[in-house]
Image (cartoon, rainbow, N blue to C red):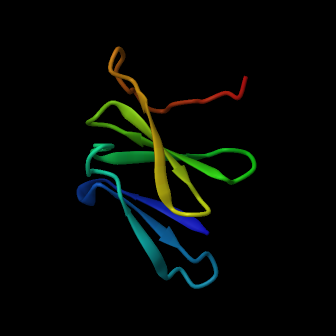
Amino acid sequence: MGYLAMPDENAVAVLDASTWQVMAKVDTGRAPHFGTEPVWLLMNPDGSTLYVVNELSDNVLVMDTATNQVTGVISLRKCRVYLPLVLRNS
């Protein structure tokens, strides 16, 4: 699978890596997530979770890559998102 941030559409496209065909489009801008303008995508090491960094809403959406569903939100309201962003597994 491949993933493409689509900031103008508040979405993440899920691509078939062998054909580059769009398999799904995950809406990040709807309630309760409100992930507006996704700009950076970070995959965890085992590939099960995609972190979607949203520039305008100052949050990070947590997406399950098996179901292509947003499963959580990490709020960054107390700080601004400045890119590039580095996440470290502790």
Q: Residue 25 appears in which quarter of the rendering?
A: bottom left
User: Which residue occupies 48% across, 57% down?
Assistant: 69
Q: Is residue 83 left or right of residue 31?
A: right
Q: Is residue 10 left or right of residue 5?
A: left
Number of marks drawn: 0
Where is 79 relative to 83, above or below? above
For the C terminus, the quadrant is top right
Locate residue 88, reporting x and y percent: 67, 27
Where is 87 relative to 65, above or below? above
For the N terminus, the quadrant is bottom right
Residue at the outermost top position: 78
Locate residue 63, reporting x and y percent: 51, 50
Q: Is residue 2 left or right of residue 81?
A: right
Locate residue 18, reporting x and y percent: 64, 81
User: Which residue occupies 25% across, 60% down?
Assistant: 9
The answer to which of 49 and 13 lies nearer the viewer is 49
Where is 68 relative to 36, above or below? below
Where is 35 relative to 59, above or below? below
